[in-house]
């Protein structure tokens, strides 16, 4: 119970500071706007892709298992591999001369 009491005391102190210096209200407002933008960046694409429709297999409200199953079924990102080495790659024997690899 001590943590909860300390938390409320901290909230009261922060509120008192905000009331004394009203210019500081800008920071909580900007923080709220930032959180809404980040949340929307995750939720809005779900509506356009149809991810939120039919998430639950049972037809009811989606459960945690439904979300995990949906995440497993998402296509995996392709592995990025470096291109194969070719004969056109240049190797420099000295700082003044460069020649194609294999021809010295």
Image (tube, grey):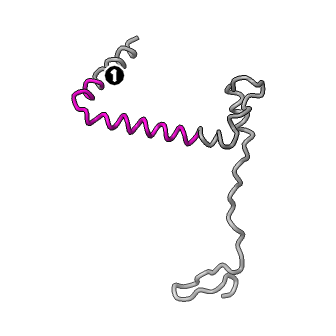
Work out which quarter of the rendered image holds the C terminus and state it. Answer: bottom right
Range shown magenta: 15-42
Q: Nearer the viewer, residue 31 or 47?
A: 47
Q: Nearer the viewer, residue 94 or 49?
A: 49
Queried whether the magenta region covers residue 36, the answer comes back as: yes
Residue at 74% from the left image edge and 32% from the top image edge: 54
Q: Residue furthest top?
A: 1
Q: How many marks?
A: 1
Queried whether the magenta region covers residue 74, the answer comes back as: no
Judged by its main secondary structure, the magenta piece is helix
Residue at 59% from the left image edge and 40% from the top image edge: 44
Image location of residue 23, percent across then percent down: 26, 36
The residue that label 1 is drawn on is 11
Q: Quadrant of residue 65?
A: top right
2 lies left or right of 86: left
Q: Quadrant of residue 62?
A: top right
Q: Nearer the viewer, residue 53 or 12?
A: 53
Residue at 54% from the left image edge and 39% from the top image edge: 40
Residue at 23% from the left image edge and 32% from the top image edge: 21
């Amino acid at each position: 119970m001590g943590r909860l009491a300390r938390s409320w005391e901290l909230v009261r102190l922060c509120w008192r500071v905000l009331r004394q210096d009203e210019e500081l209200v800008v920071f909580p407002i900007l923080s709220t706007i930032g959180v809404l933008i980040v949340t929307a960046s995750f939720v809005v694409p779900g509506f356009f892709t149809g991810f939120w429709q039919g998430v639950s297999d049972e037809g009811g409200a989606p459960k945690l298992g439904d979300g995990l199953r949906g995440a497993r079924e998402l296509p995996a990102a392709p592995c990025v591999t470096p291109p194969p080495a070719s004969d056109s790659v240049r190797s420099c024997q000295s700082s003044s001369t460069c020649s194609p690899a294999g021809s010295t």
